[in-house]
Image: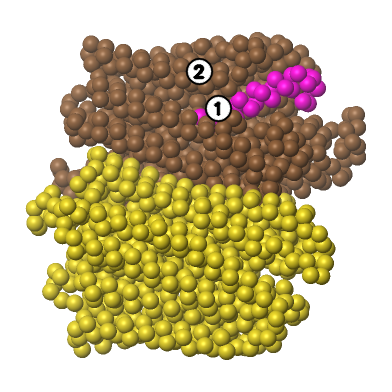
Chain colours: A brown, B yellow
């Protein structure tokens, strides 16, 4: 069967709305779950208000930044306005703004559902693990469906309206620039609160996690929402948009050359199938009373991958798509699974690394840190090999199709790896919801059994996070590799348009490592993720020190608080305010470093240096993202493993060392690690968009 | 003036012997210093014996490894023996073995003088800071002169005898493969002992550093010698040889093309001048009573750089060398200074990072680790920019000279940066000597004043290490970049010889990042330094846990030891044995990973993948080496800063957190960080040497 491109676009739009419908149905389902506990409603409201306050402040700050960015874009992109027609620049600026708005909405939707689902999941825990799990999971799935639906819808609409792939990059840049700050800001907020609450509560005073006497406890729960729900949603919205945008830019170029529409059609079709597979996956999610929530979550993920592979094969057969490209996409998916399994090995508490680190904890915190860092560094190897092999294999598989196809193959491998992004987000959002539920159970005094249930749900959230993070990081790597291709074609188009070379001549064919500009870019690009993550961690560090001081003050000044006297409550809002102000103060410089360093390198070394810069950035970005995520997950699970009675159990010296490891790991895995993902996407989008400027102005 | 190449080679040999003469004179001077204390002589002998025992065992193990490697080289390199004439392969195998022997001798010489100078410096401390400093410094300079003299002599002789640059690479590979294991083994030994001694002694029992009751105290002092003296000597011998070899390979190729000898002459001349400048620098070393040893050490370094720049300018004028190449070399030196200053900023206890980390120590070990890691990550940026800029500038400066010159320029920038290697080694070897002296003062009960003096000498050693390490890492980076050039020319020669392409056709001109084989290599290559350093750190971790158990056993079983009863001594040898056995067991796998991964990638992706592999390896290797060295130095100095009375001073909670930071930093800065240097050199030499094999056999 042969169809017009419009057919696939309409199909994509229909599936998007199907996802919205699913999200709405799930939302209604979650909202209809019983809730009656007054204390939980009260605390839940505090969390919801805190999260909304932070989000409002953050978006206000970012709105100013985005307005400035939109003006700069209008003036200079795709070409300086004095050399261009105004419509192009206006389209670009609007596409950028639409990207930021879509991304912001994704975060807001996530917060709205998460702050309801946490209460439902908490109350359901008194009835059993199954209803509690379902409330948490379906709450997460609302977010998953909403984010993936809106990214597919956004990409399709932008291309339908503008018919211009550069505008697509603008939309994607809008999404990722907002994601960069949202992830960084949310990440700083959540870890500030988490670390401070643990440090004073658990370590100094020895009171339980989520004890309502702790002034930072609500801020901690707010943090789960703004960092892990809103920030993560913006982040994956961005990754998903970037992978589709990169694939579509290349598909459109190939289609233009062959006067067809087949390649673009394929991208829409595969993306829509990915979303469809996720919808089916969400509904197959189920668990038996007494079953393992980890297995339930992982099963959904793997079921979705199988459905995706099957349906895309069917579509490829039905619509006469290229089988080689299907294979590239399947390779991406398969390698994603391998990366996920590798991350799982290094963080799962039934495997050797956790046991070895737990043993090291017995010798004190220094050994805990050293062994955790070492295993984290080792864990990078299988994933780096996996990403390298999938890029190599996708390239080689598509090479016989002709020029341009190999890179398109790599971008389709990224689309394949991200096909299950709906599941990734659902699982990721499930984590903070049940984490919050655990807090509410504790604060609402719902009893030991409910606490045990939410504990096990929470721990499952941690474990599956490692798997889904592997997918997300791998896909970001592949996307950015294919964005390198987009960058080259942007440069070549611009070189012809600005008269640098004649029509038909290619200004740039690749980036030779032996070229010193490329090498210069490579070295500087590699340092950026290191500096970026250091800035975020120092932000958390500074902010947490401020908050610890505040918690100490409250315990000292509020009479009866430490003893838990009836009716005495801490000033929760003060801690929320410190986390909010600090996070907003710290998020801007780190984000600017990523964007400005790209511009500096471009204006010094020109487009060749930028090629090296993007590459160095990907390579070291992947390395640090994998290292930090896995080390962090490893320490977290090691601490939980010790708490469950191993190596001396709770309150032993090993446990204290484990807490130190976990505290170091927190900003690793929830602030710096996942933000690097967005950082590398932002860098390559900035580079692609400003290619023309570097062509016109550069020192070397 | 125009001279024959022989003139410069003879000059190089003369300067080498001048260096040996200087070393001998300094040795005699140190040996003639008074020594009378019986207790010091006794402990000194224990240290000397321990170091020699370890070295003997290590060299025995490595001899077996090198013998196997030599056989493999004889069979396969430069081309498989069945396609080659036997002489070439025999030359290569012999050059390799000579390289390993030279490197081993460098280590042995260092140990011999260091274990005398430590005693002299300890005794001199009773008289004042000046004589104590001079004994330590001149002891270190013996090592510096011997190592640099023998590397210059070795390179010159190999080229004179074989007249074959590939043999030079074989010699260099011999040096670096031995260095890889010596550095790794010594690094594991020293940190095993250091960490265990501190952990049980300082932290658990609260007894002073170097207290003779501690069973690990002699092992700790032995470790300084085998790790920081012998290991470091082998390491810098290797870097120096590699930088000269890379420059000579390219110079010879350029000379052949132009039927001249000018470029090779220039390399010999500059290297000889570097050594001469170091000799002068050593004799200008002086300090006043009451002066700062840090300033004395840094002054020497800077004086040497100025002498080098001046003398090379003079030579360039006198011998009609190319001024552009002089400029490239001067750029390397200048950037080396910048990198040194940047490292100094991040580790000096008068600067902000140390103060910030000390403040973080007040909030506990987790914050100590987080802030130390963050500043370490940030510290990579100026150095990465510096290396990138110097490569770019050296390339651009030499570009007008014609094809081949730009890469030669980069290699001469590396030669320039390493011109002061004699000073680097002298300063580096000074560190462990005065560290040992401090231990001897403590164990020999030479009084508070002598302890204060050796303390200040020891602390100066730590600070200047940061500066010299910056030089060493930067130079390794530049050398390996230029080795990429050597790799390309090896491949091209081999491609013609094996009939892959016709005479005059270039098989390889560079490595395009967009080529997926290159990208695959890049990703895998970037992961290797991470895995390599993780293996070393886990080795230290495992080994230290064994030793801690042994120390506990001795304190429990030996009656009167803990109380310091007269005549009760611990079983020092047991600890030395554990460190020795463990280090030798752990060093082989890490080294093999580096070598074998190169072969695997080459046989999978061919020469293009290797290009990416080397590049990824350099980029992430530099990043991790800088990060680990600087974080480690930062933590070390933070601990010392707190001990000197800041942020609560000794035995405060901040101090305990500082000790955790220092313990994590120990294997960072003395095991993993500096070994990465050697690892990246080994990888690129293996790659260059096996280029022909990958050309003949590879999967893609």
Which residue is found at the position 47% from the left and 41% from the top? A380
Name the side, left or right, on which A340 lies relative to B98: right
In the depicted view, which residue is nearer to us: B571 or A233?
A: B571
Magenta residue check for A448: yes
For the record, the magenta segment spans A442-467
**Percent from the top left, x then y, of residue B226?**
54, 66
Q: Quadrant of residue A686?
A: top left
Quarter of the N terminus of chain B within the rendering: bottom left
Residue A300: give its label: 2
**Percent from the top left, x then y, of residue B345?**
56, 66
In the depicted view, which residue is nearer to us: A169 or B187?
A: B187
Which residue is found at the position 31% from the left and 28% from the top? A328
**Percent from the top left, x then y, of residue A3?**
24, 14
Magenta residue check for B267: no
**Percent from the top left, x then y, of residue B219?**
63, 64
Q: Residues within 10 Å of mark 1 (few under 14, many from 20)?
A: many
- A366 above or below A487? below
Q: Quadrant of residue B575?
A: bottom right
Element class at badge 1: helix
- Quickly name the residue at label 1: A464
Q: Earlier in the sequence, mark 1 or mark 2?
A: 2
**Dot 1 falls on which chain?**
A
Q: Residues within 10 Å of mark 2 (few under 14, many from 20)?
A: many
Q: Main secondary structure of the magenta part?
A: helix
In the depicted view, which residue is nearer to us: B436 or A617?
A: B436
CA–CA distance between discs 1 and 2? 11 Å
């Amino acid at each position: 069967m042969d169809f017009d491109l419009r057919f696939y676009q309409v199909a994509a739009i229909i599936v998007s709305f199907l996802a919205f419908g699913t999200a709405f149905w799930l939302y209604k389902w979650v909202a209809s779950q019983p809730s009656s506990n007054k204390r939980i409603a009260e605390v839940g409201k505090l969390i919801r208000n805190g999260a909304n306050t932070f989000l409002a402040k953050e978006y206000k700050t970012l709105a100013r930044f985005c307005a400035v960015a939109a003006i700069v874009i209008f003036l200079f992109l795709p070409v300086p306005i004095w050399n261009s027609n105004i419509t192009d620049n206006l389209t670009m600026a609007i596409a950028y703004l639409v990207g930021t708005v879509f991304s912001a909405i994704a975060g807001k939707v996530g917060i709205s559902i998460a702050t309801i689902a946490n209460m439902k999941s908490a109350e359901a825990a008194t009835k059993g693990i199954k209803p509690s799990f379902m409330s948490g999971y379906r709450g997460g799935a609302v977010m998953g469906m909403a984010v993936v639906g809106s990214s597919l819808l956004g990409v399709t609409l932008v291309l339908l309206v503008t018919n211009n792939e550069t505008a697509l990059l603008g939309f994607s840049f809008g999404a990722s620039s907002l994601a960069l700050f949202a992830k960084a800001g949310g990440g700083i907020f959540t870890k500030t609160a988490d670390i401070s609450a643990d440090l004073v509560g658990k370590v100094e005073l020895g009171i339980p996690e989520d004890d309502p006497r702790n002034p930072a406890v609500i801020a901690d729960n707010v943090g789960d929402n703004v960092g892990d729900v809103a920030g993560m949603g913006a982040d994956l919205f961005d990754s998903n948009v970037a992978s589709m945008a990169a694939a579509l830019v290349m598909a459109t170029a190939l289609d233009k050359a062959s006067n067809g529409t087949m390649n673009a059609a394929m991208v829409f079709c595969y993306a829509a199938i990915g979303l469809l597979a996720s919808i089916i996956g969400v509904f197959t999610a189920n668990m038996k009373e007494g079953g393992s929530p980890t297995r339930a979550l992982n099963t959904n993920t793997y079921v979705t991958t199988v459905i995706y592979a099957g349906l895309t094969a069917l579509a490829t057969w039905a619509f006469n798509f290229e089988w080689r490209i299907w294979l590239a996409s399947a390779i991406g998916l398969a390698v994603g699974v391998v990366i996920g399994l590798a991350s799982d090995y290094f963080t799962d508490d039934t495997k050797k690394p956790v046991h070895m680190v737990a043993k090291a904890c017995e010798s004190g915190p220094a050994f805990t840190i050293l062994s955790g860092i070492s295993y984290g560094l080792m864990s990078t190897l299988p994933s780096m090999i996996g990403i390298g092999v999938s890029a190599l294999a996708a390239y080689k598989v598509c090479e016989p199709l002709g020029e341009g196809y190999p890179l398109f193959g790599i971008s389709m491998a990224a689309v394949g790896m991200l096909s299950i992004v709906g599941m990734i987000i659902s699982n990721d959002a499930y984590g903070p919801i049940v984490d919050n539920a655990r807090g509410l159970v504790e604060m609402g005094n719902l009893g030991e059994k409910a606490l045990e249930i939410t504990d096990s749900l929470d721990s499952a959230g941690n474990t599956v996070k490692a798997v889904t993070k592997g997918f997300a990081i791998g896909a970001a790597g592949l996307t950015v590799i294919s964005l390198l291709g987009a960058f080259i074609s942007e440069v070549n188009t611009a070189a012809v348009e600005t008269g640098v070379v004649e029509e038909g001549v290619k200004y740039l064919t690749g980036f030779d490592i032996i070229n010193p500009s490329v090498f210069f870019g490579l070295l500087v690009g590699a340092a950026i993720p290191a500096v970026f993550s250091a800035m975020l961690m120092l932000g958390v560090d500074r902010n947490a020190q401020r908050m610890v001081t505040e918690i100490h003050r409250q315990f000292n000044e509020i009479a009866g608080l430490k003893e838990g006297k009836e009716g005495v409550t801490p000033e929760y809002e003060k801690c929320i305010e410190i986390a909010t102000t600090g996070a907003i103060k710290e998020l801007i410089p780190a984000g600017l470093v990523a964007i400005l360093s790209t511009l500096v390198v471009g204006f010094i070394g020109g487009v060749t240096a930028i090629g090296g810069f993007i590459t160095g950035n990907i390579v070291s970005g992947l390395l640090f993202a994998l290292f930090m995520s896995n080390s962090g997950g490893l320490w977290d699970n090691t601490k939980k493993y010790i708490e469950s009675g191993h190596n001396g159990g709770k309150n032993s010296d090993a446990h204290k060392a484990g807490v130190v490891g976990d505290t170091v790991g927190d900003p690793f895995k929830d602030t710096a690690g996942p933000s690097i993902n967005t950082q590398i996407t932002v860098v390559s989008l900035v580079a692609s968009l400003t290619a023309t400027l570097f062509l016109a102005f550069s020192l070397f």
